[in-house]
Image (cartoon, rainbow, N blue to C red):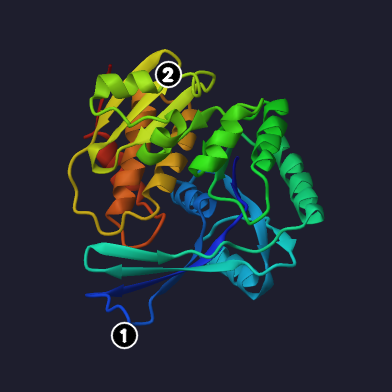
Amino acid sequence: MILTVTLNPAVDVQYRMATLHLDNVNRVGNGTVSAGGNGINAARVLTQLAAPTLALGLAGGVRGRQLGRLMQRDGIPNAFTPIAGETRECVALLHGTAQTEILPAGPRVTAAELRAFTTTFTARLATATAVILAGNLPPDVAPTVLSDLIALAQQAAVPVFLDVPGPELDAVLAGPARPFLVKPNQQELADLLKQPVATTAAALSAQLAAPALAAVPWVLVSLGRNGAIARHGAKRYRVTVPTIAAVNAVGSGDATTAGITWAITQGMSDAAALAWATACGTVNAGQVATGSVDSAAVAALAEDITVTAI
């Protein structure tokens, strides 16, 4: 079973409009509402891939209960730890080809609530094959929490697939616990390395072996429509994807994380795992729903993806 962890989830509300009028009234349809947060998006994709999964995290208040109903609607097994604070609501305005997002910081979380979550997490590790730690943290929750969870997983011999924002990633990599895989985007990689991301595949692949990343077995950097580049140990790969008509790219990174986690736990080769993961992210971009794939489409697209050793 793959555990996903979302410590700062959200009820996501999405509105579509032809044009966004600033400082004016924008009349829209009713929009769509979904359970949001990077780990939840990954859990939704895993569920659609028929992968055994369990979503863990923190949720509270009226929106926390709504979050639970939305996960149930999507068939996502979950065991969230209740908190006193109110789960946030995030709003996305899709106007033309652009997107504007409003993302609140999230609720306060007490030390007792974090301890309760850690107890649940530790118990669930007994049946876990992998853990996905994804997304940002609530206010005042220190990044050391992530390192603590990684250490607990390591003690249980469960690999951790980490997809968190730059500051949290920096903090984890500076600590003693090491994830099995990290998936920074291009900006996060540049911030981590404190230098611009290389423009050629060969030079970029060399950056993936930088000292800050050297102790991490797997590094996967998504390049959007340009595919991805990855390192597994001393091996480096360039992933090239066919061009598709993107509808909603939100959640594509989460779909990629879900895909690589499932593929590796299934024992796929490096090339097959990277093709499968990138197919998940690409198929998501062609869907209206966030963090959503069609397993048949993923399997078909994976056959058309090229993975080249560098």
Q: CA distance from mark 2 to mark 1?
A: 49 Å
Give the residue displayed 23% in from the left and 38% down from the top.
226
Q: Indicate the amino acid at tag 2.
A: Ala
Is 82 located above or below residue 65 in the figure?
above
Q: Indicate the amino acid at tag 1.
A: Asn
Q: Is residue 88 left or right of residue 275?
A: right
| Image disc number at residue 209 | 2
The residue carrying mark 1 is: 24
Give the residue displayed 74% in from the left and 50% down from the top.
117
Residue 208 pos. (x, y %): 40, 23
Work out whether residue 17 or residue 295 is closer to the camera in this orientation and state it: 17
Q: Secondary structure at mark 2?
A: loop
Q: Give the mark nearer the N terminus: 2 vs 1.
A: 1
Residue 75 pos. (x, y %): 53, 59
- Dot 2 surroundings within 10 Å: few (below 14), some, or many (20 or more)? some
Q: Secondary structure at mark 1?
A: loop
Is 101 located above or below residue 234 in the figure?
below
Residue 236: quarter of image: top left
Work out whether residue 207 or residue 49 is closer to the camera in this orientation and state it: 207
